[in-house]
Amino acid sequence: MSSAQVNLSEEIEKRSRQFEDRFAAGDVNGVLDTYYHDTAWMSPPGAPLLKGRDGIAGFFNVAITIYKSLELELVELREVDAVTYELGRAVLTPKDSNQDPLHCRYLVIWQNIDGVWRVSMDFFAPGEL
């Protein structure tokens, strides 16, 4: 792995930890500011394609009422020019202790705009990777 890839991996890991912290705190605006471009798209399971900050905020406003935490695990990165593909696993832990955690797999596309890496597309689905 080149030093540029290591630095990018560290940057994505850092943003992922910030995402987790803000999600656990119920800070939807913090999640969006840290992780997503304003024009990002999200494709959550069982829902229509969400476009932009308002659409994604609507999803997280509901998610934080159901889940107390969300943990991300980076499995693989593939960098192509100013775009990077991240394949990973996520575990959402419900607030209701009688419910099982939700295990998901995800693919996000990170885009470097003006020197800042943020997610431009987010696709995830229930199930193990």
Image (tube, rainbow, N blue to C red):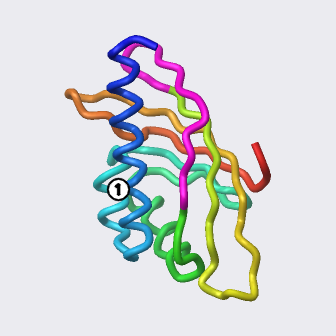
Q: Which residue is mark 1?
A: 18
Q: Amino acid at mark 1?
A: Gln
Q: Nearer the viewer, residue 61 or 93?
A: 93
Give the quadrant of residue 116. Answer: top left
Give the percent coordinates (x, y) of residue 10: 36, 34
Residue 83 is covered by the magenta coloring: yes
Q: Nearer the viewer, residue 106 or 101?
A: 101
Residue in view at x 58 percent, y 29 percent = 76
Give the percent coordinates (x, y) of residue 103: 72, 59
75 over 64 or under it: above or below = above
The residue at the far right in this view is 127
Residue in view at x 34 percent, y 72 percent = 27
- Magenta extent: 71-84
Magenta region, main secondary structure: strand
Horizontal placement of 53 versus 109: left or right?
Answer: left
Residue in view at x 33 percent, y 16 percent = 4
129 over 26 or under it: above or below = above
**Picture mark count:** 1
